[in-house]
């Protein structure tokens, strides 16, 4: 109800109401303005000015309701997720392990900061946000990651490394929040970001579960033809999926063009079904094409 009082004061002043709308649009708060104007129109249905504005804004509101709800910048999110997935796959090299623990890759320690940097980049570029703040956050994240990582490699501190397994992902999550809210957020935006963070975690979990099922079925189909995927390749694919999901989950539930308090929370997880279908269809067709291509060469085998 940020604009309610000012809209009420401008009930008989078309120029003032137009200026107020333009200011709200520049602040990316047009949705809040429209909601407040609808409330004013409901209280004063005989006002011709409110009626005209209600008709002016209604088509946009209805179009938004008919749309998917969150107009994410998929042209940015998908290529960025592929780049992040490729980086994760390259860092999943078996040679990049800690000397005192041959089972732990460097990536196990670095995945949180890398995913956080990718999310900050997506949100900043998609929304044309505060780039100075984003660069400062990215620099701080790199510094907070590089120092303990270098210290662990230099002095071999397993206890220190175990602590970083918990704290680096948490620091990356805080960095994403600061890039969105700054250092002094209001309560509404802070609560909205926390709510969206939970939704991102749930969405990412669903993506990983479905992606794991898809990968398992694909590997099983190839195993039936006697084609066994090397463990190194399977490991790289798993980490690549983790990196890609970090960006895709955010793009699925968060609209970077809107303030956190203006985000839509009523869509629920039902949107994931069509989104997952669109994302997995090209992969399914690729696996099926390879499978059909390989069948003739294995047809005569016992």
Image (cartoon, rainbow, N blue to C red):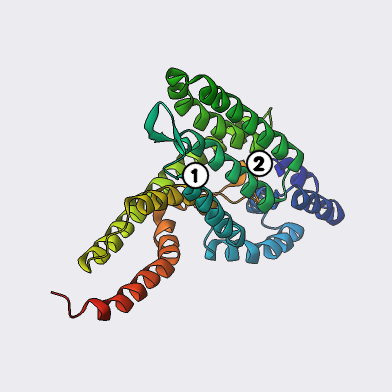
Quarter of the picture containing the C terminus is: bottom left
Q: On the picture, is 299 further left or further right than 218? A: left
Q: On the picture, is 231 further left or further right than 184? A: left
Is residue 128 visible from the viewing direction of this image? yes
Residue at x-position 75% and y-position 53%: 25
Mark number displayed over residue 91: 1
In which quadrant of the rendered view does residue 73 lie? bottom right
Residue extending farthest to the right is 15
**269 over 175 or under it: above or below:** below
**196 over 228 or under it: above or below:** above
Spot occupied by residue 6 in the image (x, y as percentages of width and height): 77, 43
Mark number displayed over residue 1: 2
Q: Residues within 10 Å of mark 1 (few under 14, many from 20)?
A: many
Quarter of the picture containing the N terminus is: top right
- Spatial CA distance of label 1 from label 2 is 48 Å
| Helix, strand or loop for disc 1 | helix
Spot occupied by residue 88 in the image (x, y as percentages of width and height): 49, 47
Residue extending farthest to the left is 302
Q: Residues within 10 Å of mark 2 (few under 14, many from 20)?
A: few
Residue at x-position 45% and y-position 28%: 165
| Helix, strand or loop for disc 2 | loop
Q: On the picture, is 290 further left or further right than 122? A: left
**210 over 171 or under it: above or below:** below
């Amino acid at each position: 109800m940020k604009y309610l009082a000012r809209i009420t004061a401008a009930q008989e002043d078309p120029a003032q109401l137009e200026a107020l709308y333009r200011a709200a649009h520049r602040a990316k708060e047009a949705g809040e303005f429209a909601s407040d104007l609808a409330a004013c129109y409901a209280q004063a249905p005989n006002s011709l000015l409110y009626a005209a504005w209600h008709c002016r804004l209604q088509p946009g509101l209805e179009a938004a309701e008919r749309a998917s709800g969150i107009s994410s910048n998929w042209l940015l999110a998908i290529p960025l997720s592929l780049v992040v997935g490729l980086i994760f796959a390259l860092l999943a090299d078996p040679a990049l392990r800690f000397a005192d623990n041959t089972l732990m890759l460097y990536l196990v320690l670095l995945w949180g900061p890398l995913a956080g940097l990718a999310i900050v980049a997506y949100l900043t570029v998609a929304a044309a946000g505060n780039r100075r703040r984003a660069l400062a956050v990215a620099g701080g994240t790199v510094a907070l990651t590089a120092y303990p990582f270098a210290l662990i490699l230099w002095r071999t501190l397993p206890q220190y490394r175990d602590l970083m397994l918990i704290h680096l992902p948490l620091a990356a999550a805080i960095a994403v929040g600061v890039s969105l809210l700054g250092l002094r957020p209001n309560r509404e935006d802070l609560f909205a970001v926390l709510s969206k963070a939970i939704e991102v975690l749930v969405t990412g979990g669903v993506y990983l579960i479905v992606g794991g099922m898809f990968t398992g079925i694909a590997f099983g189909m190839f195993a039936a033809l006697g084609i066994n995927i090397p463990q190194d390749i399977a490991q790289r694919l798993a980490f690549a999926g983790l990196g890609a999901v970090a960006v895709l989950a955010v793009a699925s539930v968060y609209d970077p063009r809107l303030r956190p308090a203006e985000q839509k929370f009523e869509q629920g997880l039902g949107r994931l079904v069509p989104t997952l279908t669109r994302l997995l269809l090209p992969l399914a067709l690729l696996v099926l094409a390879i499978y059909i291509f390989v069948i003739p060469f294995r047809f005569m085998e016992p």
